[in-house]
Image: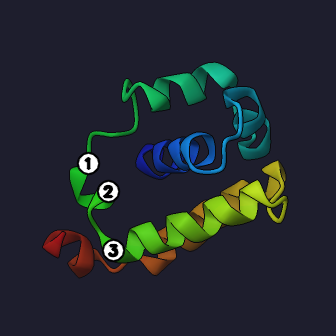
Amino acid sequence: MPVARALLAKKLVDVYDLSQTDAAKRMGMSQPAISQYKKDIRGMKEVVFRENARFQEIINDIAERIAKGGIKPGQMPGEMCRLCRAINPEDIAEG
């Protein structure tokens, strides 16, 4: 889910003051990917996800846990699945 990864990357760098390299390591991806997310080159096409309160709540929780070391890179796929399962399609349609 590129939108979620983009939001997480931005939050880790902007809110938790992690370097792009550190955010990339914690998320299990490359620094260039984080850079592209930060520049809105990829992952930010769906405004509905950025404006959905429930989606943002879960993104904030995941970002905080990553920043505090509570989520390791190998756990990211499970966290992304948790995020997808928590989102009700009707909520997304409402924005």
Amino acid under label 1?
A: Glu
Amino acid under label 3?
A: Ala
Label 2's element? helix
Nearest the eye: 41 or 84:
41
Instruction: Report the side of 43 relative to 90 (left or right).
Output: right
Label 3's element? helix
Mark 3 lies on residue: 53
In the rendering, at what x and y percent does residue 93 appear? 17, 71
Mark 2 lies on residue: 50
How many numbered circles does the render carry? 3
Mark 1 lies on residue: 46
**Which disc, if any, is residue 63?**
none
Crowd around label 2: few <14 · some 14–19 · many ≥20 (10 Å): some
Residue appearing at x 55%, y 42% in the figure: 14
Instruction: Report the side of 11 relative to 76 (left or right).
Output: left
Examine the image and state in which quarter residue 45 appears: top left
Between discs 1 and 3, the one toward the N terminus = 1
Give the Cα distance between marks 2 and 3: 8 Å
